[in-house]
Image: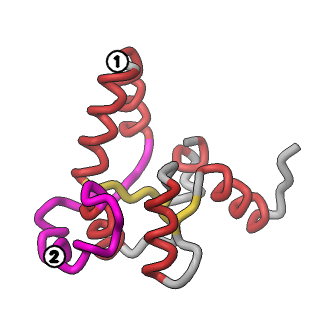
């Protein structure tokens, strides 16, 4: 989050991901919804709309094991990010197999990549 606030990394969100994030936070940690809004107000991010993704949805069906992840892949195809951060191991595996490269990583893996790129070490 700090990397996004400091502008070190760019953030791309989709309508789908943002609404899903809000739903999960509201259901499990309702007291954190206002913190999500505060964070979003403090960073610059690009938004991929459902309309932008519509054309790509059909080609994504059957690529990911979980049908609920189809909009995620569509958003990735539209936005073309360098990395996709997700805690979903199956989605990471599906995306990396589809792209033929490590594109989907956990937050910890991403932070290690950033540290190496910036010449930092976490201890």
69 is higher (above) or lower (below) than 3: below
> Residue 54 colored magenta?
yes
Q: CA distance from mark 1 to mark 2?
A: 34 Å
User: Going 83% across and 56% down the picture, which residue do you hit?
Assistant: 120
> Is 97 on the left or on the right of 50, as rendered?
right
15 is higher (above) or lower (below) than 27: below
Q: Which numbered tag is attached to residue 49?
A: none
Mark 1: few/some/many CA within 10 Å (<14, 14-19, 20+): few
Residue 65 location (% of width, % of height) = 35, 64
Tell me the quarter of the picture where residue 39 sits. Answer: top left
Q: How many marks?
A: 2
> Is 30 on the left or on the right of 61, as rendered?
right
> Residue 114 colored magenta?
no
Tell me the quarter of the picture where residue 98 sits. Answer: bottom left
Q: Which numbered tag is attached to residue 30?
A: 1
User: Going 18% across and 71% down the picture, which residue do you hit?
Assistant: 57
Residue 119 location (% of width, % of height) = 83, 63
The quarter of the image holding the N terminus is top right
Residue 93 location (% of width, % of height) = 51, 67
Q: Which residues are magenta?
A: 43-69
Residue that protrudes farthest toward the top in the picture: 31
Say which label, 1 or 2, has the lower sequence index.
1
Mark 1: which secondary structure?
A: helix
- Which residue lies under the disc numbered 2? 58
Residue 49 location (% of width, % of height) = 18, 60
**Dots 1, 2 in contact, CB < 8 A:** no
User: Going 76% across and 63% down the picture, which residue do you hit?
Assistant: 118
The quarter of the image holding the C terminus is top right
> Is 45 on the left or on the right of 92, as rendered?
left
Tell me the quarter of the picture where residue 111 sits. Answer: bottom right
């Amino acid at each position: 989050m700090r990397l996004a606030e400091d502008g070190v990394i760019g953030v791309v969100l989709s309508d789908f991901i943002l609404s899903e994030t809000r739903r999960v936070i509201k259901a499990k940690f309702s007291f954190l919804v206002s913190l999500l809004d505060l964070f979003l107000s403090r960073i610059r991010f690009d938004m991929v709309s459902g309309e932008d993704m519509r054309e790509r949805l059909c080609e994504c069906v059957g690529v990911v094991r979980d049908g609920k992840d189809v909009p995620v892949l569509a958003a990735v195809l539209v936005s073309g990010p360098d990395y996709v951060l997700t805690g979903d191991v199956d989605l990471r595996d599906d995306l990396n197999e589809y792209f033929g490269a490590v594109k989907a990583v956990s937050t910890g893996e991403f932070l290690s990549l950033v540290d190496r790129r910036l010449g930092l070490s976490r201890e």
